[in-house]
Amino acid sequence: MTRATTVGLLLAAGAGVRLGRPKALVTGRDGRSWLERSAAALLDGGAAPVYVVLGSDAEQVSQRVPAGCATVVALDWEEGMGASLRVGLTEVARHHPEADAVLVMLVDTPGVGAAVVRRLAGQAVREGLARASYDGIPGHPVLIGRRHWQGVLESADGDRGARDYLRERCVELVECGDIGSGDDVDTPEALSAWEDAGPA
């Protein structure tokens, strides 16, 4: 049986208003930015190629995009996640007619590593919808089979992304609490907690 082809889509367009800086540029003690960390998780987990959607401070953030990743700028990024998802998914669909699924990852979930991506990508089929869950709570990344791409494009709006589309359909939850964390880190307090937890 041929393994399904899964393209990685990293949403990194936000300004990080509550955090006070673009989350794509936050760095760990190893000097890697969250953008670099997330792109590596996608690539190492088997979701490739990787498309990175930029927006706020696009020129500066683009300098952190790893070699081999494609970039696309969401000019209307201030609208919210929906704009980034539409732009990124449109690019993936245009350039990868062979892809069976896209794995959508947020740059502000630094607890998602390659093991989570690999486990989720293993569920990829064209007709499927799946998302990582942590102790039973739905989170990110989200795996979207190709049959659903047009519906997601038509429904993605504001900060909801694909939320409305997913809510109305059967989505397989893939438990990943044993290998990662899907916590959004989007405030100074959450960032301090993440740093205190000791990630690299």
Image (tube, rainbow, N blue to C red):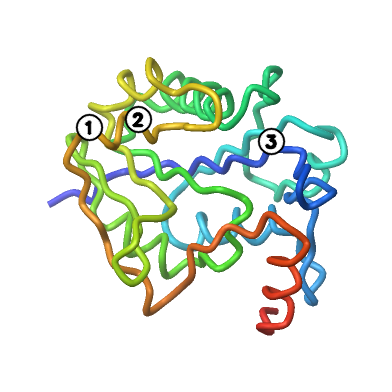
As drawn, which residue projects farthest toward the left?
Answer: 1
Against 44, residue 7 (above or below) is above
| 51 or 109: nearer the viewer | 109
**Rendered location of residue 131, percent (x, y):** 32, 52
**Rendered location of residue 115, percent (x, y):** 42, 70
Q: Quadrant of the C terminus?
A: bottom right
Image check: 190 left or right of 113? right
- Tag 1's secondary structure? loop
Cα gap from disc 1 to disc 2, whole angstroms: 7 Å
Residue in the image at 25% along x and 48% along y: 124
Image check: 10 left or right of 1? right
Q: Quadrant of residue 68?
A: top right
| 81 or 94: nearer the viewer | 81
Query: What amino acid is at disc 3?
Result: Ala
- Tag 3's secondary structure? loop
Residue under label 3, please give it.
13
Residue under label 2, please give it.
164
Q: Quadrant of residue 41?
A: bottom right
Residue in the image at 55% along x and 22% along y: 87
Question: Can you tell which of label 3 and label 2 is closer to the viewer?
Answer: 2
Q: Quadrant of residue 98?
A: top left
Tell me whether circle 1 and circle 2 mark residues in contact (CB < 8 Å): yes
Image check: 193 left or right of 30? left
Residue in the image at 48% along x and 70% along y: 181
Q: Earlier in the sequence, mark 1 or mark 3?
A: 3
Residue under label 1, please give it.
168
Query: What amino acid is at disc 1?
Result: Glu
Cα gap from disc 1 to disc 3, whole angstroms: 26 Å
**Rendered location of residue 174, percent (x, y):** 27, 61
Cα gap from disc 3 to disc 2, whole angstroms: 21 Å
